Image (cartoon, grey):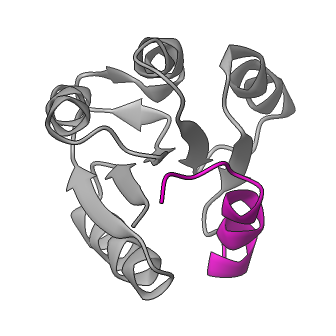
Amino acid sequence: MPHAVIVDDNLESSETLAILLEMEGYSAATAASLRDARQQIADHRPDVMVLDRALPDGQGMDFIVEALKGGPMTVVMLTGTSDPGDAAEAIRRGAAAYLVKPATIDQLKAVLDRAPLSA
């Protein structure tokens, strides 16, 4: 079963997204900070990480490269900031997509359907 980590300091949003991903066949965990995300990745490396741009202890944009150093993972930036420059930068750093909140599950599924996942 593919595994996803949702990194967002909005607990309600991340829990809702986790439930939606579980309905799509993923196991899902949440992290409210970069520190929590590092621990989640160390405990069970995800196939997919959905990452917010602004977190209490740093910027998700800066975390993309760090997270990808540990091996393959599909990173999706999911943020409230609609900025073409940020979107281009996220993709340059290795994100598969940059989605603006409130993104639909169909938008996320379109990205995940293209992602290479573990069985």
Residue situated in front as seen by the camera: 75 or 7? 75
Q: Quadrant of the N terminus?
A: bottom left
Question: Which of the two residues, 12 or 97, is positioned nearer the viewer here?
Answer: 97
Question: From this viewpoint, which residue is outermost toward the front?
Answer: 119
Q: Is residue 61 left or right of residue 58?
A: right
Q: Choose top left, top right, bottom left or bottom right for residue 114.
A: bottom right
Residue 118 magenta-highlighted: yes
Residue at horizontal 77%, vertical 32%? Answer: 87
In which image quadrant can residue 105 be found? bottom right
Q: Is residue 42 left or right of residue 81?
A: left
Left or right of 94 in this view: 21? left
Tell me the residue at 85%/33% (across/down). 84
> Measured from the top left, where is residue 25 in percent x and y?
45, 79
User: Range of the magenta residues?
Assistant: 104-119
Q: Judge whether residue 25 is colored magenta.
A: no
Q: On screen, 115 above or below 109?
A: above
Q: Which residue is depicted at the point 45% across and 75% down?
A: 21
Indicate the position of residue 19 as horizontal and vertical percent values.
34, 81
Up-down relation of residue 30 to residue 97 (above or below):
below
Q: Residue at x 37, y 44 (%)?
A: 46
x and y percentages locating residue 65 in the rendered image: 52, 13
Give how far across and how far down residue 36 sits, in percent: 15, 35
Closer-to-camera residue (44/76): 44
Q: Quadrant of residue 16?
A: bottom left
